[in-house]
Amino acid sequence: MNLHEYQGKQLFAQYGLPVSEGIAAATVDEAVAAADKIGGQRWVIKAQVHAGGRGKAGGVKLVDNKDDIREFADKWLGKRLVTYQTDADGQPVSRILVETCTDIAQEL
């Protein structure tokens, strides 16, 4: 079974596990609207693919304005993200996860 990060976090939330508030967006406008709905002044935006190494490949970004969200979503939606875990063709990006930016108290 292959789950995107946003799908896994939805399952965690259903079982009462704490997760950051986030919305998966399929369009540039949905990504900006997600930030409006979540609120705040800083977000983490993540290209959703079935591979690790997204951050090093440019598929994860910390942003503090909606213009950056729009630019990131426009750059990745409908494109392919190549990471060290993909082949040379990469994986298609059909969703962008927009999440609240939270401090990490503990990593597991």
Image (cartoon, rainbow, N blue to C red):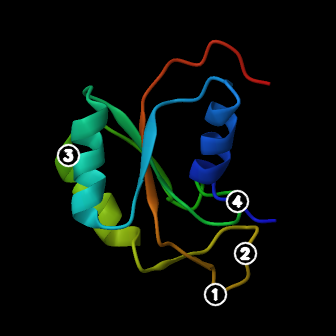
- How far is the residue under mark 4 from the one under mark 1? 20 Å
Q: Are marks 2 and 1 in contact (CB under 8 Å)?
A: yes
Q: Which residue is drawn at 66% across and 68% down?
A: 83
Q: Given the image, on which type of amino acid does mark 3 rest?
A: Lys
Give x and y (percent) for residue 63: 32, 40
Q: How crowded is mark 1: few (under 14 residues within 10 Å), some or many (20 or more)?
A: few
Q: Nearer the viewer, residue 3 or 54?
A: 3
Cβ atoms under marks 2 and 4 closer than 8 Å:
no
Callouts 3 and 4 close, C-beta under 8 Å = no
Q: Circle 1 — which element?
A: loop
Query: Which residue is denoted by mark 3 in the rendering?
Result: 66
Would you identify the image quadrant in which residue 72 lies? bottom left
Disc 4 target residue: 3
In space, the residues marked 1 and 3 are separated at their CA atoms by 29 Å
Q: Which of 1 and 15 is in front in this view?
A: 15
Q: Which picture quadrant has residue 44?
A: top left
User: How far, Cα to Cα, is label 3 from label 4?
Assistant: 27 Å
What is the CA distance from the residue labelled 2 to the residue labelled 4? 16 Å
